[in-house]
DNA sequence: AATTATCCTATTGAATCGATAGAATTTGGG
DNA sequence: CCCAAATTCTATCGATTCAATAGGATAATT
């Protein structure tokens, strides 16, 4: 399961990407718009900044804005930064490999063999879906919704 | 991440499937062979039994054995039974759907759109990999390992 | 009856999750 | 230069989950 923290992080970045302005957005504004506890969001944005996704400006007229373009940020990047590796077991993680203490032989471990496939399938989706991709699909969905509404009325 | 509990469950079922005998296997034996804390394994096996994967026999000569054949048990079945739904967000779970309280509209939620793809990719692997499949692949890996060893010597 | 095993209930310590409090720091404007 | 507005930092909190253990109750075989 995604933690709420990661979900909030994705929500915040998607929000900032949709704005796509030069003017920074205040934490308080972001928190209100997306229904995220402000103090919690504070910590999350700071962490995202430290990972290089955002940059910030203090004082009056300050706030957060994207550092990279939406095409350069993948969903996998953000989730890894906040929740850690995607892999279901540490021995198949590309970004944070660790030996499984309880398994005798990595090469012949059935769990590892299967979980490698799972990790690859997840990474294939998450590393090839950028924030820009998501925004496009959201727009499509919004259009489809409008058409539905017109049909009903 | 898989919990240790789920990992132990998979290990135990793979062990029982490899034996594939009519004679039941004792918890103590299983715990020793796979380096699993015995009392913890007790609880896990009981849970697997309640989910219909195993059946047990009490008293002398007793122990656990598979209830279904290795071809009938998928990795996904076991993981869902122990760790719960595969889906990264509740709104895309097939087995345990729940609305996301914090999202405004499910149809136009970018996180949902992406996570649906992730869930499907994971389920595609885990629901189409049976215990029998895993055992086959482990055997192949063991043969490959033997060949390696011969080459080196 | 004795032995061998699973079954059940309860509890524990540690870690993680989700969130909050309060003060420090930086920046821009008057 | 001072004030207000914003981020930044430190610290702590309660609740839940994770991983494991303890101790006895129950059932089946010999
Ligand atoms: S070696 Fe990592 S799961 Fe077995
Ligand atoms: S509706 Fe489930 S993630 Fe948004």
Image: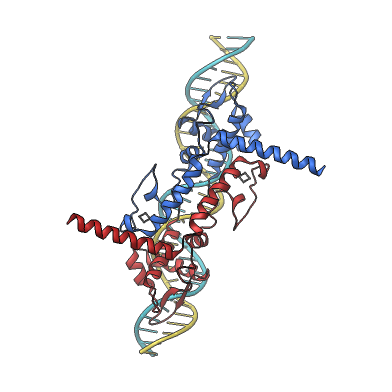
Chain colours: A blue, B red, C cyan, D yellow
Q: In this view, does B53 lie to the left or right of B29?
A: right
Seen at 48% across and 40% down, the residue is: A127
Residue found at x 30% / y 57%: A105
Snapshot quadrant of residue D10: top left
Q: Is residue A136 visible?
A: yes
Pick whichever, C2 or A32, lies toward us: A32
Residue D2, quarter of picture: top right
Residue at the outermost left position: B153
Q: Is residue A35 visible?
A: no
Ligand 1 position by quadrant: bottom left
Q: Where residue B48 sits in the image (x, y, percent)?
A: 48, 68
Residues D1 and A53: in front is A53
Q: In this view, does A45 lie above or below A115?
A: above
* Position above or below: B152 against A66: below
Point out residue D28 in the picture as x, y percentages from the top left corner: 44, 85
x and y percentages locating residue A28 in the rendered image: 62, 30
Q: In this view, does A112 lie to the left or right of A57?
A: left
Which residue is outermost to the right? A153
């Amino acid at each position: 399961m995604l933690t709420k923290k990661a979900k909030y992080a994705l929500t915040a970045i998607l929000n900032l990407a949709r704005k796509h302005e030069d003017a920074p957005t205040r934490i308080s504004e972001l928190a209100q718009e997306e229904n995220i506890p402000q103090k919690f969001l504070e910590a999350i944005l700071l962490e995202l900044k430290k990972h290089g996704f955002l940059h910030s400006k203090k004082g009056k007229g300050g706030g957060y804005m994207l550092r990279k373009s939406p095409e350069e940020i993948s969903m996998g990047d953000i989730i890894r930064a906040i929740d850690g590796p995607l892999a279901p077991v540490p021995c198949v993680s590309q970004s944070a490999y660790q030996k499984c203490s309880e398994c005798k032989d990595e090469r012949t471990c059935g769990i590892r063999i299967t979980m490698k496939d799972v990790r690859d399938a997840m990474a294939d989706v998450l590393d090839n879906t950028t924030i820009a991709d998501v925004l496009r699909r959201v727009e499509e969905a919004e259009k489809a919704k409008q058409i539905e509404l017109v049909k009903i009325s």
